[in-house]
Amino acid sequence: AEVHKHEFIIQETPVKRLCNTHNIITVNGQFPGPTIEVKEGDTLVINVVNQAKYNVTIHWHGIRQKRTAWADGPEFVTQCPVKPGESYKYRFTIEGQEGTLWWHAHSSWLRATVYGALIIYPRGNNSYPFEKPSREVPVLLGEWWNANPIDVINEAQRTGAAPNVSDALTINGQPGDLFNCSSDDTITIPVKAGEITLFRFINSALNTEMFVSIANHKMIVVGADASYTKPFTTSSIMIAPGQTTDVLVTMDQAIASYYIAARAYASAQGVAFDNTTTTAILEYDCGCTTKHGPGGIPPIFPSLPAFNDTNTATAFTTSLRSPSKVKIPEPVDEDLFFTIGLGLLNCPGKKCGGPNGTRFAASMNNFSFVLPSEVSILQAHQYGLEGVFTTDFPAKPPVQFDYTAQNISQALYQPVKSTKVYPLKFGSVVQLVLQGTNIVAGENHPIHIHGYDFYILAEGFGNFDPKKDTAKFNLVDPPMRNTVGVPVNGWAVIRFVADNPGVWLMHCHLDVHITWGLAMAFLVDNGVGELESLEPPPIDYPVC
Ligand code: C2O
């Protein structure tokens, strides 16, 4: 196993998109940021040097961080931010994970531009559990904002209104040639007839779930969130922010060039979204084909599912399976039920910009999560600081939500702001029902847990009913992921072993929702107030 050292300079960089040049925050001047490539078992040491004007932290999305919770990254959860002019070395080892992950800023909305791929190859001479591809191409799906994304969210927080949506979706940082001034910069992916390419799709957008298709080419799905999956063939994928999907494509169409195109899966009715389409071009090297650009024959465009095509989205996610029979953790020690969704808060004495003068909020079990501001939860726990958080996050919702009820309790519209964690005994088996609500609007929420992968046992629509839905659990080959899209107006059930000591944020990966409080944290320790076998914090661990 190797130790890889990297330096990430967080800096302001002029970047031109959609006919204008703006300063954005980048890593090492690159947008998207650098790709990190490692083998399973390797150690990463990444020195983050903050030369920008904002506080920043970096999160290694999907990395288990076993015993290294200090390196996980979410601001005020596992660390204080790295202030302008300061630096912090993230140090962690990749254990038992292979495939596609990514890294991103975890402060305010900085991850709009501060993100990149993190590729984990099998160790030594180990190979993939599928045919070796001739090439591998990371495809980072993102959003471009003409305004500064930090200003966009700060303004929305000031008024209580929903923030503006992005101005373009992007592939590897480029909107593509359906946009003005973008055609010269459209990402072109060279391919050879007969070869197999492994595409590593990563949805790094702040707020947009996406459908992706490649014209005239079938995709064979082989992995998701750095877990291998049983191969299956599809003409489109649905990928939510936070998720990754690995697909094999055989280049068997050398008579033209083809678009890879992505656009929103917008599950919420009446909620604004970025309805642009981003493209990249597959270009065969046969010399026989079309060229894009002036005078050329345009590439062939794929058919993409409609924006609101929940059937296709659900059919895709429920087709994922583990490659073979897995050992499901049993018996369940912690049987949890969390409602997730939106809400509204009153604005006493003034009118806010949300519906009827309210301000938007979001919650889990009706608690809207507030980050501490003076110290991280992990530090507060480890050093025994009182008054930073409480350990009474409820195992069940205090007020029951019901799709069939005639009148929905007003309490469900008004979440309570707090900083609550749910304590888990080290080693316990956790089953969690995530029940989406339709308060304000129903929506597919991609729920991500830091520090863990989990099995998705089942998902469905309407109310989760323990009597009949337990029978639907896949206890044979459920997929393992780190981010589950809880279906719009529906539920998902996940299971995992709490075998990683630390404080682990769980949140909706739509950043607008995490800003509004759709989050909580698990505190995993040995039950006697001491984190089991957590390594001590590094000497340069930031202080607030
Ligand atoms: Cu990918 Cu808490 O994040």
Image (cartoon, helix red, strand yellow):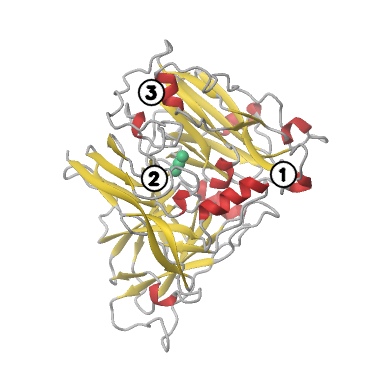
Q: Earlier in the sequence, mark 2 or mark 3?
A: 2
Marks 2 and 3: which is nearer the front?
3
Q: Amino acid at mark 1?
A: Val
Assess whether mark 1 and mark 3 are in contact (beta carbons under 8 angstroms): no
Q: How many marks on residues?
A: 3
Task: Please indicate whether residue 417 sits to the left or right of residue 98 in the image.
Answer: right
Q: Quadrant of the N terminus?
A: top left
- Residue behind mark 3: 501
Give the x, y percent position of residue 396.
63, 23
Q: Is residue 142 above or below residue 50?
A: below
Give the x, y percent position of residue 152.
57, 54
- At mark 2, the secondary structure is strand
- The mark found on residue 229 in the picture is 2
Residue at (32% x, 31% y) in the render: 541
- Residue behind mark 1: 440
Q: Earlier in the sequence, mark 1 or mark 2?
A: 2
Q: CA distance from mark 2 to mark 3?
A: 27 Å
Give the x, y percent position of residue 402.
73, 33
Q: Regarding ligand 1, which quadrant of the image does it lie in?
A: top left
Q: Amino acid at mark 2?
A: Thr
Please say whether residue 438 is visible from this viewpoint.
Answer: yes
Q: Nearer the viewer, residue 45 or 405?
A: 45
Q: CA distance from mark 3 to mark 1?
A: 36 Å
Classify 10 Å Cα crowding around label 3: few (below 14), some (14-19), many (20 and above). many
